[in-house]
Image (cartoon, rainbow, N blue to C red):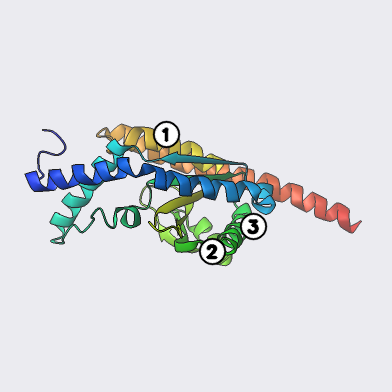
Amino acid sequence: MDAADDLSEAESALVEELVAHYAAHRSLVAMFMKSMLGYMDESSELRRFAHSIRSRMKDPGHLRDKLQRKIRDAKLKGMQFDISKENLFLRVNDLAGIRILHLHTTQIDQINKALKALIDEQGIEMKEGPSARTWDDEYRSYFKSVGIETQSSENMYTSVHYVVASQSRTTVTCEIQVRTLMEEVWGEVDHTINYPHKSESVPCREQIRALARQTSSATRLVDAIFATVADIEDTKAKQ
């Protein structure tokens, strides 16, 4: 059965209308994303702590799939699906995505401060975040210690999320994620296997969960290396 066969004719038509609206106005989202990338590139403080910055625009086919899932979820919960052409760019926040990658966990404190300063300086609205999604209690504790709210992550990944909105006549949004390079490796594997639909293979799903634990261990090792270097430099400075 096709993925959309369980939708009514009207629901399917609405999805296609929304996807066509996105395709016709995709440049609005792209321009905002590019402006954000420009601000980030000019931020010496952000570039000091970020290893690299990636970006992407949502594929129309993936948007179609997401909207179909949202309609199903709304019906299961007895709620009304209320995404329209008028609010699509506000209600779907990941049409544009920016990912900031860094080497070790404690860099998020400086990156978060630099990002918030940049957003405030440019008069951009922070719609959501910062919010750290993590399954790891130790990292949850660290994020809270630097003033970042946390959410549980059933998918077993760790990433700090923001949603920012443009000040243009047509308001559009962009999602920003900040994660370590180690978490990026896990994220790329999981995205390839489990997006837009979860793998039906139980062994494969369990292997990805095992990879999440190995990723966490590798991140801890990188954190320990940089903590050791910082301790050595601090000792030398005091001599």
Q: Earlier in the sequence, mark 1 or mark 2?
A: 2
Residue 225 visible within the image = yes
Classify mark 3: residues with Cα within 10 Å, few (<14), some (14-19) or many (20+).
Answer: some
Q: Amino acid at mark 2?
A: Gly
- What is the spatial separation of the Cα atoms under label 1 and label 3, in whole angstroms? 28 Å
Q: Element under label 1?
A: helix
Question: Vertically, is 99 above or below 129?
Answer: above
Q: Position of residue 181 (x, y in %)?
A: 56, 40
Towards the viewer: 192 or 232:
192
Residue extending farthest left = 9
Towards the viewer: 215 or 126:
126
Left or right? Give the position of 168 relative to 225: left
Q: Earlier in the sequence, mark 1 or mark 3?
A: 3
Q: Nearer the viewer, mark 2 or mark 3?
A: 2
Q: Quadrant of residue 197?
A: top left
* Residue where numbered disc 2 is placed: 123
Q: Element under label 2?
A: loop
* Residue where numbered disc 3 is placed: 110
Q: What label does residue 189 carry, if any?
A: 1
Q: Amino acid at mark 1?
A: Val
Left or right? Give the position of 168 relative to 25: right
